[in-house]
Amino acid sequence: MSNVTIPVGPQHPALKEPASFKITINGERIERADVRLGYNHRGVEKACEERNYIQDIYLIERVCGICSHSHSTAFVLAVEEIAAIEVPKRAFYIRTIIAELERIHSHLLWLGVAGHEIGFDTLLMYSWRDREIVMDILNMLTGNRVNYGINTIGGVRRDITPKQAQEILCGIDKLEERTRYYIELATEEVTLINRLSGVGFLSHEDALHLGAIGPTGRGSAVDRDIRRDDPYLSYPELQFKIVTDDHCDVYGRTLVRVGELMESYGMIRQLLQNIPEGPISVKAPRKIPAGRAFSRYEAPRGEDVHYIQANGTDMPERVKLRAPTLANVQSVARMLENSYLADVPIVVASIDPCFSCTDRMISLRTDGPGEKLMSWPELHAFSLDWNRKNRGIDFTNLNKRLIEKKV
Amino acid sequence: MKKTGKMVSEVLKSFMKKPATELYPFVKNPKPAGFRGRIIFHYEKCIGCKLCMRDCPSKAITITKVADKKFEARINLDDCIFCAQCVDNCAKNALESTSDYELAGLSRDSLKTVFNNESVDNVALRPEE
């Protein structure tokens, strides 16, 4: 049977986001998969250069709807590093609490999406019902369910009162009980295990080679986590373990995510117990001195990287961000090889993709270093010349021959 | 022990309970204190420093001088992203977040709000009306 190439997407292949997969199939087996990004370029980096640092926090927060706190924290950490601002410890604790609550809501959301993709909608309904507990906690702490706006340069905008801390603990207890149930479900329910095992296989070597990060990498036994390897915020003061799994398939990634939920509950308890008293922010200068900083952050989906270059004004010179999905998207192409066409939705969803966050402009240099700028007349001349040589009748050889004959 | 139908008992238990969802327009979920909803402006408190305008990420707020030491505010709630940075910036507490989140309307004009000396009890005037 000959190979057939079919496009999957760009409209909503797995999640409600645009990405396109060019899939070559032989029968029902996928031989090759090409990932095409670039359907949702929003120009966030350029827009950041035209706004001041305070406005940028809110813009960067809207890079992603799920890991909004990850992006804004990575941004403010870099800016604070350039300006050498001593952020109060309490602010770091509050940021870390929100970060872990965000991880909980993201992983519970993923569990529901994964359930939906394999036709286990009961799991979707129950896990999203339980997710409301953490959404309500975030709403209470920050004033919004998404796009929390808790960060500001030099600290956080809102404090956590003892009454709120009690409510968080109450919610965490409920969530922990529910997560125990989901772990039980993931390890005992035969339909779930059989549906996810061996699907979207990414070997340990491939994961290392393709640079898989976050739960995608940890599901293939890649023991990497920025919270431990390059600690930021209050993570150096916390006791937690990195959850890894050696199943190397979607089932492994599921186990990693539900395992991380349990770790997050433990972290939030430690944070609330040890949170120091004191101010929650310091006054930050509006103009950030010239300098550059690079910050890494373990978002729920993997490592989030921000690079900020400041030039002494109140606007950044350059903002570069790399969302976790960009690092994982090549693994998807590898995972899809040799799997069935019907497994495409769950395999794509297994990296918890976020294509709009990933979309950055890419320029490819094919002719060595340096770019060539062409003026309009030059381009015009090039176009005439190229057309004549490639599409029309080429007189150059004829000319040469005529000249040779004359000689 | 590996078995199938693990969630059946959970589903059956829920069968007797009332739904987890709320009948939204009839039952409204109370918003927590500090919820960032519709922004209102206290006309008498503003001193016209325009710090709110400077940091607004979506340029949704405009303060204009209408008389000596009197300022009116135009807030385009259709542009507003409800970050409440203007509320944080205001030194005189002239701006306030309310818990009103039901802003949907049939036209964009209903979201263009004006606060001046004619607006009573911080209810914004609609410029087109």
Image (tube, coloured by chain):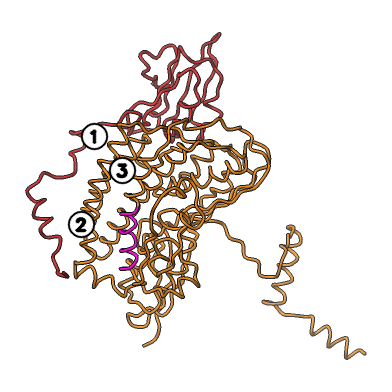
Q: Which residue is mark 3?
A: A135
**What secondary structure characterizes most of the magenta part?**
helix
Which type of secondary structure does the marked residue at label 2 adopt?
Answer: helix
Q: Give coordinates of residue B47: x percent, y percent.
A: 53, 15
Residue bounds of the magenta highlight = A251-263
Name chain A's colour: orange
Of all chains, the one bearing label 3 is A
Q: Label 2 vs label 3: CA separation?
A: 20 Å
- Residue under the image location 79 percent in, 84 percent down: A397
Q: Which amino acid type is shown beneath numbered disc 2?
A: Tyr
> Are marks 2 and 3 in one subunit?
yes
> Is label 3 on the same chain as label 1?
no
Label number found at residue B29: 1
From the image, state whether disc 1 or disc 2 is nearer to you.
Answer: 2
What's the residue at 71%, 62% (across, down)?
A371
Q: CA distance from mark 3 to mark 1?
A: 13 Å
| Residue located farthest toward the left when viewing the structure as drawn | B16
Quarter that holds the C terminus of chain A: bottom right
Chain B visual colour: red
Where residue A211 appears, as percent x and y from the top left, is 50, 67
Residue A60, x across and y down, in percent: 50, 45
